[in-house]
Amino acid sequence: MSRKNKPELSPRKAANRDLADRLAPERDAWIDRNAFYYQDHWRYLRFLVGEGRSVLDLGCGTGRMLEALAPERGVGVDLSGEMIRIAGENNPDFTFLQGDIEDSEFMKTLKGPFDVIILSDTIGFLEDCETTLAGLQTLCTRDTRIILSYYSKAWEPVLKLAEFCGLKIPQKEQNWLTAKDLEGLLNLADFDVVKKEWRQLMPKPLLGLGRLINGTLGTLPGVRRLCLRNYLVARSMNHAAQPGLSATVLVPCRNERGNIEAAVQRLPRFCDDLEILFVEGGSEDGTWREIERVIEAYPDLNIKAAQQEGSGKSDAVRKGFAMARGEVLMILDADLTVPPEDIPKFYRALVNGKGEFINGTRLVYPMESQAMRTLNYLANHIFSLIFSWLLNQRFTDTLCGTKVLTKANYEKIAAGRSYFGEFDPFGDFDLIFGAAKQNLKVVELPIRYADRTYGETQISRFRHGLLLIRMVIFAFRKLKAI
């Protein structure tokens, strides 16, 4: 499209472009002068984006953020021709384009889709935020994540004072939007927010204490709302549904002989292609022989089985998911305290696009009298509050055994496992922390937790309680203090 056919810029937008053109030669010097602020910002974006992704940076300036993220494929767009010229000279491996992201015809020229689309402070300069966000849908797939990063409205007077004093790069008047405003705009544009975070209580190094303050005090509930920057991660709802997927129900089992046939009999046939997979872990009560008998007794069902070489539920889940043929992976604990009859609810929630990681919760409905001991119940409630804060998503019951996700998303979690390492004896947190790191939409599905009818629980209140405390510390280090 020739320049003369492009829509004429509004006076406000033209003034922003002209100011950016004038300041472009100074832009990198301003960044270097406030290196602590920018390095912290980019470090958190690297955590959100991950490695090996295609990234579209809308409002890229001189390209320093794309350089810091080092994506496999990077495209930057800016209204300022001078910013784009400098960005291209400094980062020849990326593509930089001058254009107005509120111009729908220009946006159609971008070669999407992208894994991640970032608007870092750009939202403040837009004239129609909702329409601009809605226009990003054509660049999205089911897995694309939109990241909005913006200043907290509470910091508006401080930032204006900093600009007046020459401590901040000059800017024209911006939109000052709260995190709630941004969430509402994303919702209007058919994006679903999967994560919110607040960072940078201290945007200056403060004699080496700045990062310590940001990684501790700045993460605390209540206090974090005072931070300088808001981050929202969202997914497209237009691509969320995945009807007709095949499924594998994984049943890890050890000393559960009396529950094997009941699991098969009670599990509804909720999809056309259903696989039932038992992974047995060195039982002493004849569980493996019972599995073999049940497979022979139900030849019309697709039932498979394997025995663990290792030990523990985490090992069983990894072995089972590696073997699973289904596109949806589902865990059903062999104690059947989560009723098999509820498994179709988890499947529907996922394939209908309600969530990407469906986690059962036993702490909403009343329980049967012996289903969970009082001390366990109280501890679970306390840990649910802690983990909801750590993960920035509602988690009322991290240890409910029933968890559901697609095989594609599980493979992403497995590929990124090196970030956390081999830390989880339960198997639950490997999936939960991985889902949080991958920015998956988490949905909790309440179930009625039943009494165990066969065997004994393999959970030790105090030993596993100490392990939960270890998980809290681990999650804080890996997901908060970064």
Image (cartoon, rainbow, N blue to C red):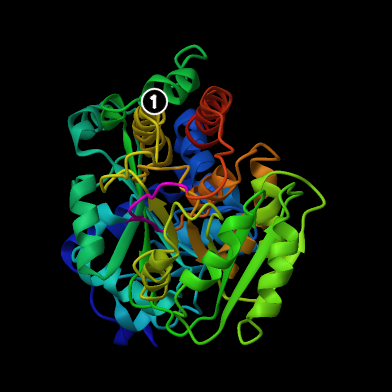
Which x, y percent locates residue 138? Answer: 38, 80
The residue at the far right in this view is 309
> Which residue appears at 25% of the width and 80% of the height?
7
Answer yes or no: is residue 413 visible: yes
133 relative to 272 in the view: left or right: left
Residue 270 to residue 232: above or below:
below
Question: Picture coordinates of residue 36 (x, y %)?
Answer: 49, 28
Is 456 located above or below residue 217 in the figure? Answer: below
Q: Nearer the viewer, residue 474 or 470?
A: 470
Instruction: Judge from the rendering whether residue 421 lies leftward or rightward of residue 377; answer left or right.
Output: right
Label 1 SS = helix
**Residue most toward the top?**
207
Residue shown at 20% from the left, 38% from the top: 153
Q: Residue at x 75, y 46 (%)?
A: 284
Instruction: State the residue in front, 234 or 432.
Output: 432
Q: Residues within 10 Å of mark 1 (few under 14, many from 20)?
A: few
Give the magenta range.
441-452
User: In which quadrant of the rendered image does the N terminus lie?
Assistant: bottom left
Q: Position of residue 306 (x, y in %)?
A: 76, 64
Residue under the image location 57 percent in, 45 percent down = 455
The residue closer to the viewer here, 104 or 118, is 118
Give the camera-side residue of 405 and 474: 405
Residue wearing tag 1: 375
Determine the image quadrant of residue 126: bottom left
Is 375 inside the magenta-drawn segment? no
Q: Amino acid at mark 1?
A: Leu
Q: Is residue 75 visible?
A: no
x%, y% of residue 357? 45, 59
Residue 18 vs 151, above or below: the answer is: below
